[in-house]
Image (tube, rainbow, N blue to C red):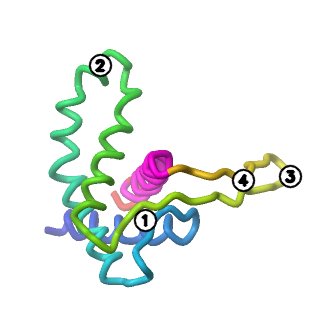
Amino acid sequence: MKRFLRSFFIHLFVVWFVANSFGGIDYQHNLQFLALGALALTFADSLLKPLINLLLLPFNLVTLGLFRWISGVVTLYIATTLVRGFSIVPFTYPGFQSNLFILPAMTFSPLLAFIVVSFVISFVSSFLFWISK
């Protein structure tokens, strides 16, 4: 139970962080939809992602793990279909500029928004899971 609660709160924070920092996640500024989306993402991540990884095992073996990102996109899609007020929407990233590098502004289509949001959620949540161990 402790592991599930930790996973839920990490997903809750990550979904809120990505929605407010990058965009692409619409929870209608309702905390109930945010919590339900994080709960659905937690269930999909813990129950369905291992099954999806098992089904995609031949592709992952042939490509040396390059297709592992598909399981993250599928679990995010499942979470958005389970919760009506939680969705991934097309968005425009405003860009970032510093003295070291420049990220230009980009517009993401619906499919690309799923992929990018899945990557960002996976990266941030993996980092937080690593810190919380």
Residue carrying label 2 = 61
Residue shown at 13%/68% (left/top)?
Answer: 1
Q: Report the amino acid beneath label 2.
A: Leu
Q: Secondary structure at mark 3?
A: loop
Tell me: 45 left or right of 96: left
Task: Say whether marks 3 and 1 touch (CB < 8 Å).
Answer: no
Q: Earlier in the sequence, mark 4 or mark 3?
A: 3
Q: CA distance from mark 3 to mark 1?
A: 27 Å
Question: Badge 2, how many Cα within 10 Å: few under 14, some, many 20+?
Answer: few
Task: Say whether marks 2 and 1 touch (CB < 8 Å).
Answer: no
Q: CA distance from mark 2 to mark 4?
A: 35 Å
Q: CA distance from mark 4 to mark 3?
A: 17 Å
Question: Badge 4, how many Cα within 10 Å: few under 14, some, many 20+?
Answer: few
Q: Which mark is residue 14?
A: 1
Q: CA distance from mark 1 to mark 4?
A: 22 Å
Q: Secondary structure at mark 4?
A: loop
Residue carrying label 4 = 105
Q: Earlier in the sequence, mark 2 or mark 1?
A: 1
Q: Report the amino acid beneath label 3.
A: Asn
Q: CA distance from mark 2 to mark 3?
A: 40 Å
Q: Earlier in the sequence, mark 3 or mark 1?
A: 1
Q: Secondary structure at mark 2?
A: helix
Q: Which residues are magenta?
A: 110-129
